[in-house]
Image (cartoon, rainbow, N blue to C red):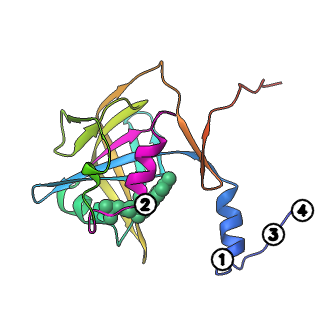
Amino acid sequence: MVLEGNDFSAKEFRRGVWHQTATTVALLTSAADGRENVMACEWSMMISFAPMRFVVSVGLESVTHKFIEKSGEFGLNFCSDQQAKLSHISGSNSLRDVNKWEMDEFPKYSGKKIKAPMISECILNVECKVIERLSFSDHTVFIGEAVWAKYDPEKTPLIYHKGKYWYLGVNVPKE
Ligand SMILES: Cc1cc2nc3c(=O)[nH]c(=O)nc-3n(C[C@H](O)[C@H](O)[C@H](O)COP(=O)(O)O)c2cc1C
C-alpha cells in the first residue's frame, strides 16, 4: 500500500518516510577541550568532487555538535559491513553519560590534518575542515572540505535501512 501526506508530526508517517531511505553509516569523530568523541551518523555524504566536500547533519543536543562547533573539524569514517557494532555503540550512547571508547575496541589512529581521532578498518576515512554551516532548531548541517582521505577498495560498505544494518546486495544491471 502506497502512503502519502504532509503530516510529518505524526510519528508513524514520519518513521515510514525515514524507513524508505537507505544510507551508508559514518563514525563521525571529533575532539575539543582535550576530549575525543565518536558517534554514528547516517546523514553524511559526499557532495562534490573538486574541491572534495562532504556534508553531515548533527543534532544540537549531541556532544559531537559541541566539539565540531569548537574545533571546526570532523572525521568521517565510513563503516565497512564488519563495523555494525561500533555504529550501534557510538549511536546509542552519548559521551555525556558514558565513555564510549571503553565500551568496545574502537581501532583508532591519529589524523594527518585534524585533531579528531580516526577509526581504522573502515571503507573510507575523510578528514574534514568545516567551511560552511546551516543552522536549524534541532540540527546543524556542517559542510566540510576534505583535507585528507584514505580508502580500502577491498571492503564493502555497511548499509542502514529501516533502522537495521544490511550488507550491500548484488549489482543491478542498468538495462
Ligand atoms: C545508525 C545510526 C545513525 C545515526 N545518524 C545520526 C545522524 O545522522 N545525525 C545525528 O545527529 N544523530 C545520528 N544518530 C544518533 C547519534 O549517533 C546519537 O545521538 C549519539 O548518542 C550522539 O553521541 P554524542 O552525544 O556522544 O555526540 C545516529 C544513530 C545511529 C544508531
Decide: marks 3, 2 in contact (CB < 8 A)?
A: no
Decide: marks 1, 2 in contact (CB < 8 A)?
A: no
| Outermost residue toward the right in this view | 1
Mark 3 vs mark 4, CA separation in Å: 10 Å
Q: Position of residue 7 (x, y in %)?
A: 71, 80
Decide: marks 3, 4 in contact (CB < 8 A)?
A: no
Q: Quadrant of the N terminus?
A: bottom right
- Vertical position of residue 116 compared to residue 157: above or below: below
Mark 3 vs mark 1, CA separation in Å: 14 Å
The amino acid type, in three-letter code, at marker 4 is Met
| Outermost residue toward the front in this view | 103
Q: Position of residue 40 (x, y in %)?
A: 42, 52
Closer to the N terminus: mark 4 or mark 1?
4
Mark 4 vs mark 2, CA separation in Å: 32 Å
Mark 2 Cβ and ligand 1 under 8 Å apart: yes
Label 4 belongs to which residue? 1
| Outermost residue toward the left in this view | 34
User: Residue at the spot x=18%, y=62% of the render?
Assistant: 70
Q: Is residue 57 visible?
A: no
Label 1 belongs to which residue? 11
Label 3 belongs to which residue? 4
Mark 1 vs mark 2, CA separation in Å: 20 Å
Label 2 belongs to which residue? 92
